[in-house]
Amino acid sequence: MGLTLYHQPGQTPIEADQLRGIRIKSISTQGQLNEFEQANINDAIMRLRTAPIRNVLTMDFVRAVHRQMFGQVWSWAGIFRMHETNIGGAWHQIPVELKVLIDDAEFWIHQETFAPEEIAIRFKHRLVAIHCFSNGNGRHSRLMADLIAVRIFGMPEFTWGRLSDANAHTTRATYLDALRQADSGDVGPLVSFARS
């Protein structure tokens, strides 16, 4: 396949062996790939808004959300990565790290350790750091934060910079800066960005 790939700062490059998992063989540019992925994500969001969900905080559900978001485009959607990436821990530790995150989130909820918004954002931040999947981890972690906000706490979805008047480049730079601050222990800017 002659897919021309590029990636922006903060994105995981798609490796050549992962490209074999593309389901839509007519895709030949990054722009087309982005369009098909976004259409798949939009479908997933619509389904997840109305689907009966018993428990958001399970490994099966985390995987199912990724599969719903990307399964029309990638055959490996919802499957934990089995290779090292430019971010994230060792691939063989993903199930262990994800289980610890889920247990921590359940503790935060039951003990009211943090405000509900902060629990959802802390979960998102740790989830993207684990980097469970070959690609789509940022988008997936944002949707998981939305699902935690809505399904567990009855709050509205996050806006993730959509309310800002800034252009897409500035919005992304603000998001990446907020992620770096969260990496250093300050999740406040990421919480603020999520509601901007």
Image (cartoon, rainbow, N blue to C red):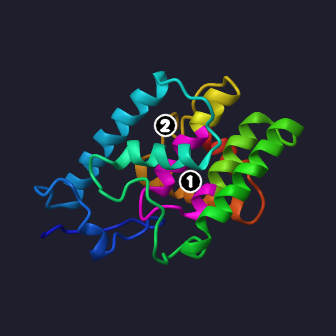
Q: Secondary structure at mark 1?
A: helix
**Percent x, y of residue 190:** 66, 49
Quadrant containing the N terminus is bottom left
Look at the image and tell me whether residue 145 can be seen.
Answer: yes
- Residue at 35%, 35% (x, y): give it: 42
- Precedes in sequence: disc 1 or disc 2: 2
The stretch in magenta equals 127-145
Q: In this figure, what is the number of numbered marks?
A: 2
Look at the image and tell me whether residue 178 can be seen.
Answer: no
**Percent x, y of residue 116:** 76, 34
Q: Which residue is mark 1?
A: 175
- Residue at 58%, 58% (x, y): give it: 128
Is residue 120 magenta-colored? no
Dominant SS in magenta: helix
Q: Secondary structure at mark 2?
A: loop
Amino acid type, mark 1: Tyr
Whether 171 is drawn above or below 53: the answer is below
Quadrant containing the C terminus is top right
Q: Which residue is mark 2?
A: 162
Amino acid type, mark 2: Arg
**Percent x, y of residue 51:** 47, 24
Drawn side of residue 142 relative to residue 103, left or right: left
- Residue at 58%, 70% (x, y): give it: 88
Q: Nearer the viewer, residue 11 or 69?
A: 69
Whether 137 is drawn above or below 42: the answer is below
Q: Nearer the viewer, residue 158 or 93?
A: 93
